[in-house]
Amino acid sequence: MTTQQLSGTTAIVTGASRGFGRGVAAALTQAGAHVVGVARDASALEEVREQLGTAFMPVAADAADPVVAGQLIDEYRPRALVLNAGAFPLPRPIHRHTWQTFSRNWEVDVQHAFHWTREALLAPLEPGSTVIAVSSGAALRGSPLSGGYAGAKAAIRFLTGYAAEESRREGLGIRFIAVLPQLTPETGLGRSAVNAYAAREGVDVAAFLADRGPALTPARAGEEIAGLITGPGHDQGAYLLGAAGLSPVP
Ligand SMILES: NC(=O)c1ccc[n+]([C@@H]2O[C@H](COP(=O)([O-])OP(=O)(O)OC[C@H]3O[C@@H](n4cnc5c(N)ncnc54)[C@H](OP(=O)(O)O)[C@@H]3O)[C@@H](O)[C@H]2O)c1
């Protein structure tokens, strides 16, 4: 799908009120799509609408609710679906987690990816549609201060791969791609993790970030994810995403 083909189509972005999701919503509206943005905080969504104008439609809802997934897929039949919503993991070592805090990202991130992916296959979305699920670089390396976060993000990568295979087997023509962003202090979630890892290493945040190279910004993440949807030549099932752009997961 080219930028021109995105013009006039509808995209749904979960977690669109801030961070990467807001960057994706901005990039997709710039590419000509109408964007339905889902998050729980209505006032934060309203700010995005003020920024992006009428091409952005806010929907204040819990993206992990299966009814929300079913209703919005049925209503909008999006050409692009970006499953980006994610909960803040509680930044503590493993033994300081309870099962409830450990499993938070399973209940929110994985559950939401599961419901929306299932609805996209069942609808099914139009051939040529793209579903992008936001996993994490932590899915490859672990994240010892985030409870079940890394495992949850690995599960999202797997379920996206399973959905791609079902799409291929049934000839649906829907692309399913997992994106694994690097840790960045440029969003609230990332900043909380950076603060926790810096404190654990006994260094200040500037020292922790010093040898990590340029940070991934929400605007850059938005451009790259929009480029995955509109640009040719992206035929891999999963990509790492950093400040330098996308690279296939080895
Ligand atoms: N930042 C990083 O370093 C990093 C690295 C790798 C992967 N990621 C992943 O990238 C995604 C975006 O992260 P971010 O850093 O941009 O986080 P963020 O700034 O905290 O934004 C998270 C977004 O998700 C929404 N959200 C959370 N729970 C929701 C729910 N139940 N229903 C609907 N919306 C919900 C939030 O809005 P409400 O709270 O208003 O609902 C917000 O819009 C997440 O999946 C995260 O795990 C982030």
Image: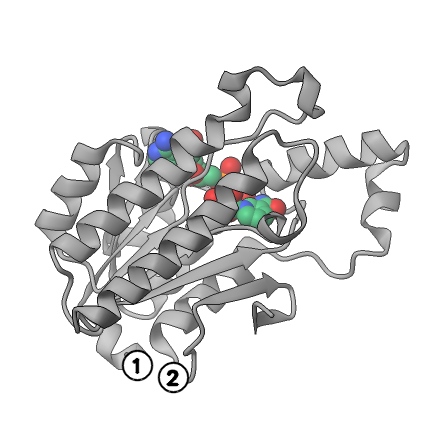
> Which circle's residue, 1 or 2, is located before the other in the chain?
1
Question: Is residue 35 visible in this depiction of the protein?
Answer: yes
What residue do we see at 43% from left, 68% from top?
Answer: 237
Q: Amino acid at mark 2?
A: Pro
Tell me if mark 1 has few (under 14), some (14-19) or many (20+) residues whose alpha carbon lies within 10 angstroms of its own: few
Residue lying farthest bottom? 233
What residue do we see at 47% from left, 33% from top?
Answer: 105
Of labels 1 and 2, the one closer to you = 2
**Label placed on residue 2:** 1
Q: Amino acid at mark 1?
A: Thr
Above or below, comparing residue 100 to residue 55 in the picture: above
The spot of residue 227 in percent (x, y) is 42, 73
> Residue 142 sits in which quadrant?
top right
**Label placed on residue 232:** 2
> Residue 69 sits in which quadrant?
top left
Q: Secondary structure at mark 2?
A: loop
Q: Of 153 and 224, which appears nearest the observer?
A: 153
